[in-house]
Image (tube, rainbow, N blue to C red):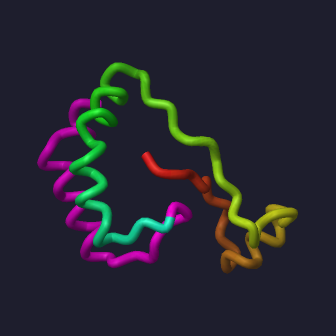
Amino acid sequence: MQRILDRTNLFRALQQVTRNQGAPGLDGMTVEQLPDYLKQTWRDTRNKLLNNDYRPQPMVIPPFLTGVTSRTYAAINGGLPPLALCGRL
């Protein structure tokens, strides 16, 4: 866990996310909003991870997937397997 939470490793990951300029997630957070969010929440999140107290938010199913089977989801998702859809850290 220490290697995952290493500052250099995390900065590299943030740079990669920024370079990719992906679309907002289910929470609507943009790549531009992420650094400020992390500045506000990272210390607490890191401590929870290190102390094994971190509890992710419940899985969120977007409205367009309500009632969708894994087979039809695969068709919607270009034949890719279903992904875990989670809220913010």
Using the image, determine if residue 36 lies above or below residue 10.
Answer: below
Query: At 69% across and 64% down in the image, what residue appears?
Result: 62
Across and down, in percent, residue 36 comes to 24, 58
Please, is residue 69 above or below residue 39 in the view? below
Q: Residue at x 25, y 76 (%)?
A: 19
Q: Is residue 80 or residue 25 the one in the foreground?
A: 25
Compared across the picture, whether 61 is left or right of 8 comes to right
Q: Is residue 49 left or right of residue 10?
A: right
The magenta span reads 1-27
The quadrant where residue 23 appears: bottom left
Membership of 15 in magenta stretch = yes
Query: Which quarter of the figure is the N terminus placed in?
Result: top left
x, y percentage for residue 27? 51, 61
User: In this image, 3 relative to 76: left or right?
Assistant: left
**Does the magenta run of residues contain 50?**
no
Q: Tell me residue 78's x, y (percent).
A: 67, 79
Q: Nearer the viewer, residue 55 or 7?
A: 55
**Quadrant housing residue 68:** bottom right
Q: Position of residue 52 (x, y in %)?
A: 40, 22
Write the residue at 56% across / 52% down: 86
Q: Quadrant of residue 16?
A: bottom left
| Quarter placement of the C terminus | top left
